[in-house]
């Protein structure tokens, strides 16, 4: 197999892996979303007052 | 995005200190928290994601409520388990005020939460009714943390759950969680300042606030002692 073909296959596999990761990330993100914006948007910062 | 803040330990408008009758030293509490985190940390982290209540808060509540003992409270108590919520108000049939029913009917449950609850046999009909919550459910550490995280999220999202400046009123959350709705409402806790609350609540609830929010308390250790990795 020539070098350019190997490179093409490698790039294709990396791209597919990337797309799979993005798909998985979006799927997980959607599972963590409710229909209540107050819950969805709530972010809590914990602040240390220890000096 | 609604960003809220929770400062610990509380140093204003009053300074709170965790009672040495609970843990005599910070190190002793820290050592116990390391043990509890090793057992249940993965669930504190996961249910912090699903509920959007930080793992530190879930962890600190668990320490104060049960010391990380999933059987704490005794097998005849309706509040047995890690987070000690009351199973008679958590779920079931015919009461729109049940915590799980409310979370469902208000569209607040995430798919991840629904799937996890279903994996424990807790499914919803169209009105948000579930099967009764049992003693075995209370004793299940993962389910206990899941339902506890939902209840705490509901309390934080109440109109009185944070001040206008975004500071979470964890003192009020604790008062309701520990004292119950009757004491909370009859004493107008929702409108009171921290100093006023400390003089209005039973001593056990006051001690709870000190253990949770005081210097050398559970939240102080959870935030500052790097034990949650």
Image (cartoon, coloured by chain):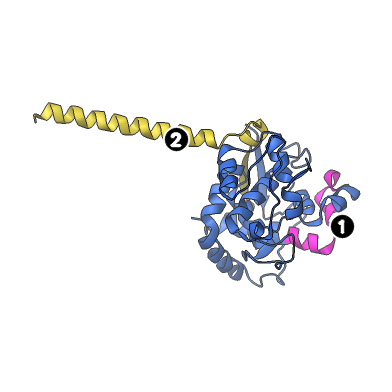
Chain colours: A yellow, B blue
- Asked if residue B49 shows in the view, the reply is yes
The correct choice, above or below, for B161 with respect to B204 in the image is above
The residue labelled by disc 1 is: B199
Residue at x 47%, y 33% (from the top left corner): A27
Q: Secondary structure at mark 2?
A: helix
Q: Is residue B66 magenta?
A: no
Q: Nearer the viewer, mark 1 or mark 2?
A: 2
Q: Chain of mark 2?
A: A
The answer to whether B229 appears left or right of B213 in the picture is: left
Residue closer to the observer: B104 or B196: B104
Residue density around tag 1, few if under 14, some if 14–19, many if 20 or more, within 10 Å: few
Residue at x 38%, y 35% (from the top left corner): A21
The correct choice, above or below, for B211 with respect to B180 in the image is below
The correct choice, above or below, for B73 with respect to B146 in the image is below
Q: Secondary structure at mark 1?
A: loop
Q: Position of residue B100 (x, y in %)?
A: 69, 44
Residue A25 got which mark?
2
Cα separation between marks 1 and 2 = 48 Å
Instruction: Give yes or no for contact between labels 1 and 2 (Cβ–Cβ under 8 Å).
Output: no
Q: Position of residue B198 (x, y in %)?
A: 83, 56
Q: Position of residue A29 (x, y in %)?
A: 51, 35
Residue at x 66%, y 70% (from the top left corner): B23
- Asked if residue B217 shows in the view, the reply is no
Magenta stretch, residue numbers: B188-210
């Amino acid at each position: 197999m020539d070098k350019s073909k190997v490179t093409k296959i490698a790039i294709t596999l990396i791209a597919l892996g990337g797309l799979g990761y993005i798909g998985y990330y979006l799927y997980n993100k959607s599972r963590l979303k409710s229909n209540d914006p107050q819950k969805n948007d709530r972010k809590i910062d914990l602040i240390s007052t220890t000096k | 995005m609604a960003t809220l803040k929770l400062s610990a330990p509380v140093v204003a408008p009053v300074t709170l200190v965790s009672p040495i009758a609970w843990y005599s030293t910070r190190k002793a509490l820290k050592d116990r928290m390391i043990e509890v985190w090793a057992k249940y940390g993965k669930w504190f982290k996961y249910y912090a994601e699903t509920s959007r209540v930080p793992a530190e808060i879930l962890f600190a509540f668990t320490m104060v409520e049960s010391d990380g003992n999933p059987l704490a409270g005794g097998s005849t108590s309706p509040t047995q388990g890690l987070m000690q919520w009351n199973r008679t108000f958590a779920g079931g049939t015919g009461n729109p005020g049940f915590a799980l029913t409310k979370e469902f009917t208000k569209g607040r449950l995430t798919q991840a939460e629904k799937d996890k609850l279903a994996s424990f046999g807790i499914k919803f009909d169209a009105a948000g009714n579930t099967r009764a919550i049992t003693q075995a459910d209370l004793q299940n550490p993962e389910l206990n943390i899941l339902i506890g995280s939902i209840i705490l999220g509901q309390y934080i999202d109440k109109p009185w759950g944070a001040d206008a400046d975004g500071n979470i009123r964890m003192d009020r959350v604790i008062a309701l969680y520990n004292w119950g709705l009757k004491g909370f409402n009859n004493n107008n806790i929702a409108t009171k300042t921290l100093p006023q609350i400390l003089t209005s609540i039973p001593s056990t609830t006051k001690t709870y606030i000190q253990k949770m929010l005081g210097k050398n308390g559970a939240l102080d250790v959870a935030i500052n002692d790097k034990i949650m990795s």
